[in-house]
Amino acid sequence: MGADSTTFPAQWPNASPGSGMYESFYMRAASPDDEVAVWIRYTVQKAPGRPHKASIWFTMFDTSNGSPVAHKATVERIGLAAPHDRWISIGSSSMGPDNIVGEAGDARWSIRVTDAESGLHHLERNWLYRTAIPKTKPESPAPFARFEGHIEVGDRKYTLDSWPGMLGHNWGTEHAWTWVWISGAGFDQDPDAWVDLAMGRVKIAGRVTPWVVNGAISIDGERHRIGGMMRRGSEVVALPGKAMMSLRGEGKTKIELEAKAPREASVVWQYGSPDGHIHDVINCSLAKLEIGFSNGDGARTLSTGHGGTYELGLPDRQDWIKPQSIPDEW
């Protein structure tokens, strides 16, 4: 099963000239053996009344090589396309359901997608993807996949040999005021288990809402939806470097999750919004995850020492780690 380019189509070609929007297709994968991971993001940005721009964001996490290596490449509208067999093409780089190829700075990659699970729509009702609210629409064409291929960063070469990870997609007219993205695979207790959660708080009339959680966890081959636009009872504490959360799902489903992101394995990008606001976004794709799962029929524990992603989007400047000196161009 898995992803395809028609089920999760690009949204930017249909954006009205006067509107502002952003859209991202991305992948992340971590070595099952070493503390090495990659996160690649293909993004379209459109300020109101202005042409599209497109960027490739690349981060290689390798604890044996010091801090993460981060690059960004930007092209104007003429270098942007949505081919029929791929989600997005930016210059000579492209991402589709089967292949991810590209370059940014001194990084080059050619990656194949294998063993992809069927897609996940984080929002539990399809009509929510057609309405103005929520302003961010998350989905994962493959919430779990394995990757083969090669990455070169300068004189260092990495071979991806069945690295577990995921393919993601989101778009919208505004970033959440604060958000958390948790993705995990390569768990010690169940190598095919995965978790994929998007949660956010939005600012309305000067007040910030409680956390809204959307996503799923798959364990023992069974997928369980977590959160929902109207579901209450979730508790989230998210800080730079660590997060703890108690999340409710369908029926009696519940997960207790702890994420830890080492400072030396984290990177900070600055994301712009169509309205001009800049967020500091801390991403660690070598995060440690501990998950306790229960659903009334029993309980399970999942853990991974470096197979998780913990991303925290903050509305203000943070002083935990220095941001990359790479502007977000609109």
Image (cartoon, grey):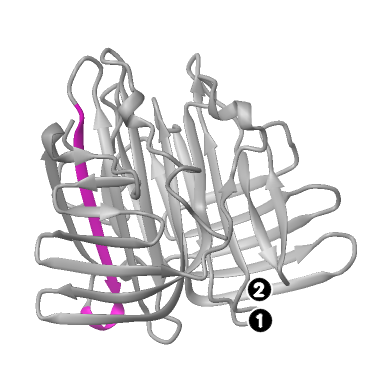
Residue with the most extreme bottom position:
33
Report crowding for label 2: few under 14, some 14 to 19, many 20 or more residues within 10 A (C-alpha): many
Q: In the image, what residue occupies the spot 49% across and 55% down?
A: 3
Q: Provide the major secondary structure of the magenta segment.
A: strand
Q: In the image, what residue occupies the spot 26% across and 43% down?
A: 270
> What numbered label is drawn on residue 189?
1
Q: Is residue 314 above or below residue 230?
A: below
Q: Amino acid at mark 2?
A: Leu
Does residue 90 show up magenta in the picture? no
The answer to whether the residue labelled 1 contacts the one labelled 2, judged by CB atoms less than 8 Å apart, is: yes
Mark 2 lies on residue: 302
- Say whether residue 291 is left or right of residue 204: right
Q: Give the magenta-colored segment's residue range.
A: 52-65
Q: In the image, what residue occupies the spot 71% across and 50% down?
A: 225
| Residue nearer the viewer, 214 or 270 | 214
- Say whether residue 23 is left or right of residue 140: left
| Residue nearer the viewer, 306 or 210 | 306
Q: Amino acid at mark 1?
A: Gln
Q: Between disc 1 and disc 2, whose residue precedes?
A: 1
Q: Is residue 322 visible?
A: no
